[in-house]
Image (cartoon, coloured by chain):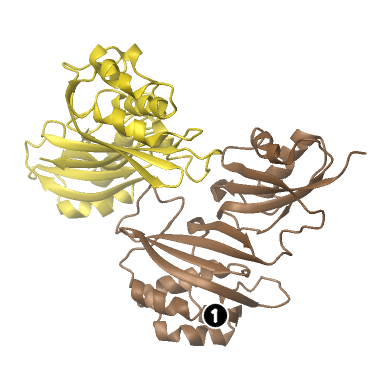
Chain colours: A brown, B yellow
Amino acid sequence: MDKLRRIMLIVAYDGTAYHGWQVQDNGETIEGELNKALHALTGEEIAVIGASRTDAGVHGLCNRAVFDTEATIPAERFADAINTFLPEDIRVRESMEVDADFHPRKCATHKTYEYRIDCEKIANPLMARYAWHVKGPLDVDKMKMAAQVLVGEHDFTSFCSVNGVTLTNVRTVYNVDIIEEKEHIIVVRITGNGFLYNMVRIIVGTLVQVGMGRIDCARMRDILEACDRTKAGMTAPANGLTLVKIEDV
Amino acid sequence: MDKLRRIMLIVAYDGTAYHGWQVQDNGETIEGELNKALHALTGEEIAVIGASRTDAGVHGLCNRAVFDTEATIPAERFADAINTFLPEDIRVRESMEVDADFHPRKCATHKTYEYRIDCEKIANPLMARYAWHVKGPLDVDKMKMAAQVLVGEHDFTSFCSVNGVTLTNVRTVYNVDIIEEKEHIIVVRITGNGFLYNMVRIIVGTLVQVGMGRIDCARMRDILEACDRTKAGMTAPANGLTLVKIEDV
């Protein structure tokens, strides 16, 4: 038997056509496409382990997938080799060998998501796949004030969909930046040590309602401390969300 | 009979799904979708006149469509009203009444196109609809030098597909800017008084070959003066191109 190596892939994808990252019985997924491509390439039955199980319709620029293989392809060459078996809306950007005990969800990481909001009066069709259209204007200063309440270690139960199952809802948010990227395009950029189910989308939905004046920004602390999903705002749609960075710290 | 008014629409579209602007026997077009939506809205048989007949797969942020109607809808309200009948990848951004003799192709205008190039080693799937993936690196300084040769009034026959039919191939290019928009994304932004068939795409294809070192930038003037399509470079694919501005001057 050839030596077993653990390989990590850095994966970018347009999530529009997929039922999310994680393999499901019905519908195509990013993980499923990676497993199929790796099988076609190596002949082995491979089930990758991902760093972030992004939802249906969410995009990724740098998700991580790890797998073990006996294939003798040089680690750095996996990227180009797998891409020839993948659909064009999924691209492996890099591949490298990692330690045999490396697990992409168990290492301490900082994850950064960006959420794009198109607040032009009429939606820009060139942004429609990657931004949530919200009839503006939004009060960005109020959104920034409300966002600062979230920074730090908190129980984020108010910003977690009820069907999320986790041991603890305590997470640390390092940064929430509200950036006016260009005219009518606002980006919410959030970095944390991990995110609960739908957490970024509920944070963005709540911040947008603050920006519209429908939620008073002074209420943000009460919403957080209530640990009650019904106190927060709406869940923003998936298409505006992109996983942009994962850093080991 | 109600008074006939001439209305102008400012139209944005993602061209990916369309066979270009102009109505064709086979396949859906932007113009065809506008005509259908206007018929549904007004009950009249309407054939809009466009400012720029963009090719299949080319995008627009501000194309213009003009039509005459007896409908009594206030001119500014047409935009929202038509959008309810249009697919989401076409949006009317504004509507206004214009003079009865206004023709969108006969007024003296400056048109600006942007062409996006993704020169990352592996294509970014989030740019794939709107950028041409070219394995970099490109020498941007050489591209800028070559581009300056095109500025001014010239016969652009070398940069026109042979099946283009026009009275004269003389056009004026006011600006060609090569912009490093972000890491690995280069934008060619070109403003002129009009463009021949495939002209922007052949200019970009040639500039990219200059950036790759396959065409010497010192040859650009000879290529222009040859008035011979076979002397210029390749035609860049449609998906990277967007009509971004039309200005009356």
Identify the residue at horizontal 36%, vertical 24% (top origin).
B206
Q: Label 1: which residue?
A: A230
Q: Is residue B58 above or below residue A56?
A: above
Percent x, y of residue A48: 75, 50
Percent x, y of residue B48: 22, 35
Q: Quadrant of the N terminus of chain B?
A: top left
Q: Quadrant of the C terminus of chain B?
A: top left
Identify the residue at horizontal 35%, vertical 77% (top origin).
A213
- Give the image quarter of residue B63: top left
A83 or B81: nearer the viewer: A83
- Residue A105, can we see it? yes
A196 or A246: nearer the viewer: A246
Q: Is residue B24 above or below residue A224?
A: above
Q: Is residue A195 above or below residue B184?
A: below
Q: Is residue B114 left or right of residue B2?
A: right
Identify the residue at horizontal 40%, vertical 82% (top origin).
A217
Circle 1 SS class:
helix
A154 or A131: nearer the viewer: A154
Q: Is residue A124 left or right of residue B99?
A: right
User: Amino acid under label 1?
Assistant: Thr
- Give the image quarter of residue A41: top right
The chain that hosts pointer 1 is: A
- Residue A27, can we see it? no
Q: Is residue B81 left or right of residue B72?
A: right
Furthest toward the right, the residue is: A1
Identify the residue at horizontal 29%, vertical 16% (top origin).
B223
Q: Is residue B13 above or below residue B203?
A: below
Percent x, y of residue A105: 71, 62
Percent x, y of residue B234: 40, 21
